[in-house]
Image: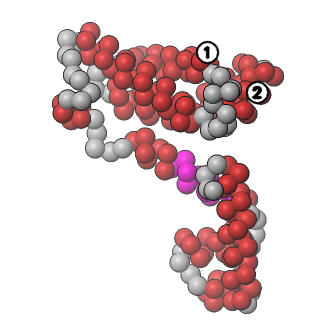
Amino acid sequence: MTGSEYGSLVRKNPSSAHRALFDEYFNYVRTIVYNHLRSCGSVEDVEECISDIFASVYFGFSEKETSGELKGYIGTIAKRISIDRYRSLSVKAGKTVSIDNEEYLTLRSSEDVVAGSERSELQHILIDAVKALGEPDSTILMQKYYYNRNSKEIGKLLDMKPATVRMRSKRAAEKLRDILSKTGIAS
């Protein structure tokens, strides 16, 4: 969802716009918050932090400042509020750890949950874009790039000549590039 899309939704119906934003970015925000608060926060602390993040997004949103994708904007707010909440909870628990301190790094998992979440979301977007190409283009691209099959093998599978498969593959790749550029992924 882009900032301009969200802005137009807010003008039409603010509550449904907030709901759409929440539904789209909840898992992303929860992952960021949990990654920061799991060592010192309770479930209630995590939920409260998530609520604070979305409230900050709702009330601080400016369409002029955030016309592109909202993911980076929301991610930045989520990280800042999560770190502040971590500091606050650490002080209340009597344990103060600087984020620059090596001990803070040992509190976190070696798995980069945010990067994994972003990679998974990117894969879903890519698969949806390939499916949007329709048949047989989507099958040709999947067979070529995912299963690493050549034009002759794909031709046998789809009952096409290898030259036809190569031409359709080239055109399908161009269509896919256009679809992805419209979503802001490829340029």
Tag shown at residue 9 = 2
Residue 140 spot, x, y in % from top left: 67, 75
Residue 101 spot, x, y in % from top left: 20, 29
Disc 1 crowd, CA 10 A, few/some/many (<14, 14-19, 20+): few
Measured Cα–Cα span from mark 2 to mark 1: 15 Å
**Left or right placement of residue 153 versus residue 91 in this view:** right
User: What is the chief secondary structure element of the magenta stretch?
Assistant: helix
Q: Looking at the image, which residue is at 28% across and 39% down?
A: 109
* Residue 123 inside the magenta-drawn segment: yes
Residue 75 spot, x, y in % from top left: 49, 32
Tag shown at residue 38 = none
- The magenta segment is 120-129
The reply to whether residue 159 is visible in this rendering is no
Q: Looking at the image, which residue is at 21% across and 22% down?
A: 97
Mark 1: secondary structure: helix
| Residue in front for this viewpoint, 144 or 105 | 105
**Left or right placement of residue 93 versus residue 12 in this view:** left
Q: Quadrant of the N terminus?
A: top right
Disc 2 crowd, CA 10 A, few/some/many (<14, 14-19, 20+): some
Residue type for callout 1: Phe
Q: Looking at the image, which residue is at 73% across and 26% down?
A: 7
Q: Looking at the image, which residue is at 71% across and 57% down?
A: 179
**Left or right placement of residue 115 versus residue 130 in this view:** left
Residue type for callout 2: Leu
Residue tagged by mark 1? Answer: 59
Q: Quadrant of residue 16?
A: top right
Please identify the residue farthest to the right as the structure is shown: 12
